[in-house]
Image: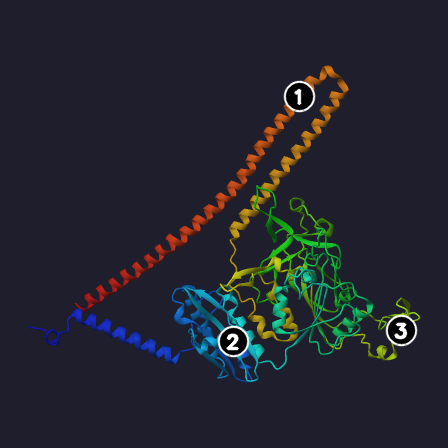
Amino acid sequence: MSDPQHKNQISLGWTPGGYATAGIILGLVLFLAVNVFASISFRSVRLDLTDQHLYTLSQGTLDILGDLEEPITFRFYFSESLVADSQLLQTYGARVRSLLGEYVAHADGNLVLEVIDPRQFTEQEDEAVAFGLGRVQVGGDQIFFGLVGTNSIDGQEVVPFFVPNREEFLEYDLTQIISRLNQTRRPILGIVTNLSLDTGPLGLAAIEQGLAAQPYFVFEQMQDAFEIEFLERDFDAIPSHIDVLMVAHPREMDPQTLYAIDQFVLRGGRALVFVDPYSEVSLVPGPAGRPLQGSTESSNLEPLLSAWGVHMQDEVIVADRASAAMVPANFDRRRQEMRYVAWLALDPTHTNANEMVTEPLQRGLNISTVGHLQVSAGATTEISPLILSSQDSMLIPVDEVRFEPDMDRLLREFVPTDEIYILSARLSGPVNSAFPDGPPPVEIDEGADGDEQTSTQPSVQPSTQAQADHLARSLSDINVIVTADSDIFDDAIYVGQVNTGSGTQRVSGRDNDAFIMNAIDFLMGTNDLLSLRARAISERPFVVVQELRQEAEERFLEEEQILRTRLEEVDQRLRELRGQVRGMGREAAPELNARRNQELARFQQDQIEIRQRLREVQRSLRADIESLGFRVKAINIVLIPFLIALFAIGLALNERRARAKRHEGRG
């Protein structure tokens, strides 16, 4: 007897193959339907699986977007129709466009985005040029890839060209533009410094020689974010409109200037201080190789630091073997690089992850010849470290690093104290004035009898009003950040150049600028940007390679020390032989000369053997690194794809077994 169900299948044309075909078609239809529905209903939803959530807006950005008080317009100029020959620009353009869409989705209608493809000989191209956008030549075409932000009161911010090398700072750059356009008044940063922040490393000397001045990289960022007001070297009061005072490696200050800073802080003023026992960035070389006149080798801010709860020891710097920077080995052909314990390449573990200023930092800091902060006895403030040395550190005199330091000797004679030193700290809490007796006496210089010479009159006591305005104790908890280094400003140790096609652009390779700007923003009270600055792709150093290099360096120095010791022994032996020759007379000289020649021959042979061993150390280092590189490549090229293939085959076999079981069940 025939099966009625089988008859229906035949009559309707439904075979097992037909079911499979129908299932595939239905699956495709459902897939397309789900994608269309998701693209409409969940336009702003993203699944960000990157390690540091680079495609998700930070909370700081969301807060700034939520605080927008008036509409802001973004005009995104992108020559999308002309970038077919550049996969890099295509990909990065899509990335920027996607992120701008995220901003619009979270701005509650207060951000308008206009995407413009400025074709040649059009009004859009004229507009882009008028806004100052840059262009790059790609395949014979001029490519625009920039942004213009405007508000309703004629405020304007421009990104001339989105540089792919700066992708990790993309969100910060966009959010900073929005923050500026939303401000009614830019904060005012007062600066007291002997560094040439505004004219660059060569300072006024470059301008006098007709060279173009280039401000320090971080100073350009300060100019973009704040109103800058430089204070003269000597002053007796700080203007009330200054929001934050930055004292960066100043010259020695007179008592009146120190008193002005003291009272500013006691009245609630916020201060960012950079002092230094040995400032290399300030020692601008002159024609004879010596620092130009006016350079300030060291700086301190006593007695203010002691009143705030810390002090910095003069003429002493922190050497850190674990964080020693790799520097060129000059004329030593046996090595390309060597470790210099006085220059520090600190990784992110040396910054305080629990402090708002340093928590976002991900790429580490480069600093050099840095001092350390010690907590003063009886301090009333809370000392929160921001930057720390490693435990493999020691203190060395400044004289050890002046002019031409012996880097090998510093490393060879390194004896760690097993102490972690505070290199930067945030100070908060109530404090007493550094001037408990009131304002210091004032020195008055007056002209004598109308001529050009001046006679210094005796010091005079401040007026009764000045005495009455004196604060002996802070009105509230102070808010001060102190760093025992000024070389953190130096472009030479962390800034690089990137060619954009239409010129070069400076980019930061470390977090030096981010730390300084974060500290200012924190003291300004604009904390939303802190979570964005330096939201870079974290460097993932080859730790094993670094350990191999350090091990080889130690072996090299050990072998070198053996060579020097043997050299001293032979020199001593030769001196003894010469003394014996002079004491025994001419008849004994040939025999002793032969002995001396034997000593020399033996030493030369030892020298050859030790040099061979030194070369073996270097060859072994290269072999270990190459072997490690081969293993890493093998894992990425062979093992990982092989495991993925095995996983896919396993899934396929499992699905096949499941289908077989279903067929058996129906049978």
* Mark 3 or 2, closer to the camera: 2
Circle 3 SS class: loop
Residue 60 visible: no
370 or 494, which lies in front? 494
Query: Label 3 vs label 2: CA separation?
Result: 60 Å
Quadrant showing the N terminus: bottom left
Q: Which residue is at a point 61% across and 25% down the rendered structure image?
A: 601
> Which residue: 61% across, 69% down?
221
Badge 1: how crowded within 10 Å, few (<14), some, or many (20+)?
some
Residue type at tag 1: Arg
User: CA–CA distance between discs 3 and 1?
Assistant: 83 Å
Q: Is residue 406 left or right of residue 174?
A: right
Q: Which mark is residue 130?
A: 2
Q: Specify the quadrant of the image occupied by residue 613.
A: top right
Labels 3 and 2: the sequence-earlier one: 2
- Return the x and y of residue 289 as percentages of the image width and height: 70, 51
566 or 462, which lies in front?
462
The image shows residue 429 at horizontal and vertical percentages of 72, 72
Q: Which mark is residue 461?
A: 3
Tag 2 secondary structure: helix
Of the two numbered discs 2 and 1 on the same chain, state the one appearing first in sequence.
2
201 on left or right of 624: right
In front: 561, or 379? 561
Q: Which residue is mark 1?
A: 595
